[in-house]
Each structure stands twice: as structure tokens, then as C-alpha cells.
Amino acid sequence: MSERKIKLEKRVFITFDIEAVTGLHIGGSDVKTEIGGVDKTVVRDPLTDRPYIPGSSLKGKMRSLLEKYNNKEINFPPNKPAFHVCQDGTKYADCDICQVFGVSGEKEFATPTRLVVRDSFLSWKSVVDLQKAQTDLPYTEVKTEVSIDRVTSAANPRQMERVPAGVIFGGKDEEGKDQPTELVYSVYSGTNCDAQKDADRLGVIIEGLKLLEDDYLGGLGSRGSGKVRFNGFKVKVLALDPEKGIREIKDFSYSTINDFSTNLTEVQGALK
């Protein structure tokens, strides 16, 4: 068996706020839904009862849009394909999406997932504003939709829970501390890893965020929900060395995702 070594070279911390431009519905568990209650609820923090954006929702939507944008084969799971996963090492070596977003560690050719996406929580200002607004449910609105049976013309009303438009996920918490949405991108060298390629692949994340701004996050998007905007980007590049320790190379600030995209090469330059 050949020796396998992988070294963590650098990390990029990308933080920003998420603004709900239209009502946002990221589904939670409906097991507690009572008769006459809301048909589709949102996911909530069990400690605070406040809605939040799971990192898995943000990461999954970015990956799905990038797969379609790059015309990737939808091949997994085998019984009911829903997304793309490289099935051999040759394709994986050239697949930016699988390198960044990850494949199962059981695959012998797999290398560490490059991208970590944290959960995103309501800003304290939005919490206060929603409390003052006395929304239908704690921190959320109830949107009633009516579907019409095209044969019988019978109406079928449904109630959907949404986080109201204008809410910010990120910002500052109750104690005034920053709590932005955070993405962590890692750069590796060693077996089946190339630090230079990883630096270039940072653009995949920016591309995914741009595609998401033009699409929607969560459910009910085709009916108006889920339009979001990303603001206030801060980027910090760290070098990791067991002898020199962890040290900051450089930090950057960008107001919008388009501003970040335009100046992407300066961040990639710091990585290289």
C-alpha cells in the first residue's frame, strides 16, 4: 500500500449577512402540527424557538445549482438519482464541485471536503423587530395559499409558515457580538491534493453564491418565497504551519457578492 499524506496548508474564513428579500421557508418537522394548524412549518432553534438557516440547506442549494450550471451527470443515489457524485478517481481529480463540496469518505480516491458551512441565526435587531411586529406565530408569518382542482374547481387552502421579508440572518447577537454566516474553505497539499488548484477552486464558492442570489433558498421558491441577498463580506486568509503556527496572511472586505467576485483574484493571490 502506498503512503498517503495530506497537509492542511491554509484556511479562508468568509463571513457575511443573509437578507430575506422575500418571505423565507426552510422546512422543519411537522410532527407536532395540530388540526387547523400550519401545514408547513419552518425549522427552529430548539433553545430559542427562533427560525434559523441550517448550513446544510445553504450548502446543498449551492451544490445543486452548480451541478446544473455545469451540466453534471445526476447519478446518485443509484435507485433515485438526485445529485452528482464522481464515481472514479480520474473524474474526481478534475471535478471542482466534488472536491469543494465533498464525496463519501468511503471512496478510496476521496480527499477532505474543502467547504464547511455553518448554521446562520437571526440578528438580534431582527429578533426585536419581529417581536414588536407581533407576527402570526413567534418570529414568523403565516401565508395562506389556495390550490384549485382543475377538474372539480374545488378550493384547497393551505397555510405555510415563513420568515418575513427584510429579516437579517447574521449581524450581531443579543450581547452585541458579531455572529455572521460563516463559510470555511480549506486548502490542502499532498496525496491527490493540489494547493494551487484549491486556490483556484475558491471561485466555485463565489459562483455558487451568485447563482443562489438569482434563484431561491428553501422551499416554495416558484411561488415567490426564498429570494435572498448576501451583504457585508469579510474574508480572512490564514496560513497553518506546525513550526510557525497559525498566522493571518491578509484580510479583505467586500460589500456584495458581485464586488467579491470582481476582486476574487486578490484573495486567490494571498492563497498562492
Image (cartoon, rainbow, N blue to C red):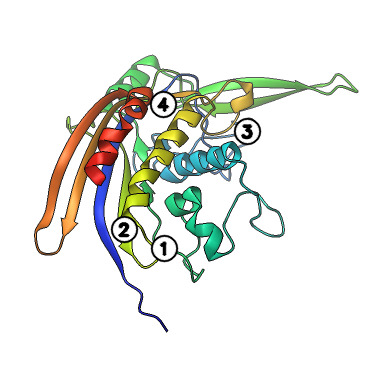
Question: Of marks 3 and 2, which one's residue comes earlier in the chain?
Answer: 3
- Left or right of 186 in this view: 220: right
Disc 4 target residue = 139
Q: Disc 1 to disc 4, how far (Cα)?
A: 41 Å
Badge 1 amino acid: Thr
Find residue 182 and report its horizontal and vertical position in percent: 31, 40
Disc 2 target residue = 188
Q: For the residue carrying disc 2, how many other residues have a C-alpha within 10 Å: few (<14), some (14-19), or many (20+)?
A: many
Dot 1 falls on a residue whose secondary structure is loop
Badge 2 amino acid: Tyr
Disc 1 target residue = 111
- Of tags 1 and 4, the one toward the viewer is 1
Question: Of marks 2 and 1, which one's residue comes earlier in the chain?
Answer: 1
Disc 3 target residue = 39
Question: To which quarter of the image does residue 252 belong?
Answer: top left
Find residue 232 and report its horizontal and vertical position in percent: 28, 25
Question: To which quarter of the image does residue 229 belong?
Answer: top left
Question: Of marks 3 and 1, which one's residue comes earlier in the chain?
Answer: 3
In the displayed orientation, state which residue is furthest to the top. 133
